[in-house]
Image: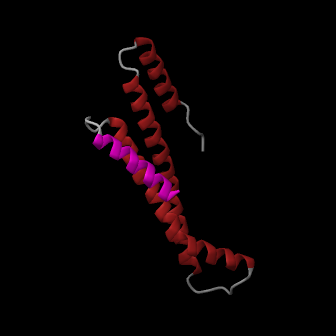
Amino acid sequence: MMILASLLTAARLIVSVIRPKKFQWEDGWLLAGYAFFMTIAILYQIVAPTMFRLEALGKGEIELYPTVAEDGLFIQKIFFVVTSGLWFTLWCVKASLLALYKRLMTGVKTYIIMWWVVVGISFVVRDPA
């Protein structure tokens, strides 16, 4: 997914640069979402060996080792950041799409009113988790 996200983001930025237009809000939100996504993906790559080691310990495949407590704390710290990063990624992508739709609906008052309704619903209705 890291490669796919990188290719799509690069394609979007290349199209942005090739076409004679300036950097738009949706481009900025898209780049922010990409940065958060890549942070999450890299952190999962970093924490994977520790997770597998603790899983093997839980299954009894390896013996108790001296740094097990530090490994547990390390995983907690990484997952705290990953959980926040996931929400930031989702909100940035949502903001990017909303900014794109706003630009596409310029000049049509009814659609702009509906856009504001969607923005309001998006920020009021959230996942309770």
Which residue is located at x 55 percent, y 36 percent? 126
Quarter in which the C terminus is drawn: top right
Which residue is located at x 44 percent, y 31 percent? 98
In the image, taking residue 127 as reference, residue 9 lies left or right, namely left
Which region of the structure is painted magenta? 1-18
Q: Main secondary structure of the magenta part?
A: helix
Judge whether 9 appears above or below 42 on screen: above
Residue 64: horizontal and vertical position, in percent?
Answer: 66, 85
Judge whether 56 appears above or below 12 on screen: below
In the image, taking residue 128 as reference, residue 32 lies left or right, namely left
- Can residue 102 be seen here? The reply is yes
Residue found at the far front of this picture: 18
- Residue 63 in magenta? no
Residue 53: horizontal and vertical position, in percent?
Answer: 62, 78
Q: Quadrant of residue 107?
A: top left
Pick the front one: 38 or 104: 104
Residue 59: horizontal and vertical position, in percent?
Answer: 74, 77
Residue 4: horizontal and vertical position, in percent?
Answer: 49, 54
Which residue is located at x 53 percent, y 56 percent? 1
- Can residue 32 be seen here? The reply is no
Q: Quadrant of residue 65?
A: bottom right
Which residue is located at x 57 percent, y 75 percent? 50
